[in-house]
Amino acid sequence: MTAQTDTPGSVTAVYKVSGMSCGHCEGAVSGELSELPGVSSVKAVASTGEVTVVSATALDEEAVRAAVDEAGFELVAKI
C-alpha cells in the first residue's frame, strides 16, 4: 500500500522501519512521528516493522526519516 485517502482530508502512508523490537520501540517511533505537523495518528508494529501514519496531507519523506532517526531507528522504505 502506498498512500491512500481514508477520509476526506486525510492521507494514510505505511513505512518500513528497521530496528524496532518491543513496545518501547513502537512508542519511541510513534512519539517522534506524532510531532510532525498534520499527523493525526501513528501505529507502529515492532513485529512487522511497519508504521502507519495518518496525516492531513502527504508527509515529506525526509521529515519522516528525520523523525524515525531521532527515535533511534532507520526508515527503510515507504510501502
Image (cartoon, grey):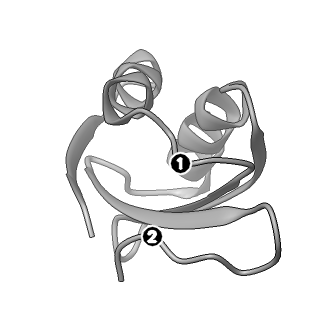
Q: Is residue 24 left or right of residue 2?
A: right
Q: Is residue 39 left or right of residue 67?
A: right
Task: Assign a secondary structure to mark 1.
Answer: loop
Residue 7: image location, x then y, percent: 81, 78
Give the mark nearer the N terminus: 2 vs 1: 2
When the figure is inspected, residue 75 is found, relative to residue 51, above or below; the finding is above
Q: Quadrant of residue 21?
A: bottom left
Question: At x 37% / y 51%, what residue is drawn?
Answer: 20
Task: Assign a secondary structure to mark 2.
Answer: loop
Q: Is residue 9 left or right of residue 42?
A: right
Residues tagged 2 and 1 counted as in contact (Cβ below 8 A):
yes
- The amino acid on which the numbered mark 1 sits, given as a three-letter code, is Ala
Q: In which quarter of the image is residue 8?
A: bottom right
Residue 57: image location, x then y, percent: 64, 47
**Residue beneath disc 2:** 3
Residue nearest the viewer, comparing 1 with 33? 1
- The amino acid on which the numbered mark 2 sits, given as a three-letter code, is Ala
Question: At x 41% / y 31%, what residue is drawn?
Answer: 68
Tag shown at residue 58: 1
Residue 62: image location, x then y, percent: 31, 25
Residue nearest the viewer, comparing 64 with 8? 8
Q: Quadrant of residue 35?
A: top right
Question: At x 36% / y 83%, what residue is drawn?
Answer: 1
- For the C terminus, give its image quadrant: bottom left
Tag shown at residue 22: none
Q: Is residue 45 visible to the viewer in this orientation of the structure?
A: no
Residue 30: image location, x then y, percent: 64, 44
Local crowd size for mark 2, using a 10 Å CA cut-off: few (<14), some (14–19), many (≥20): some
Q: Is residue 57 visible to the viewer in this orientation of the structure?
A: yes
Residue nearest the viewer, comparing 76 with 56? 56
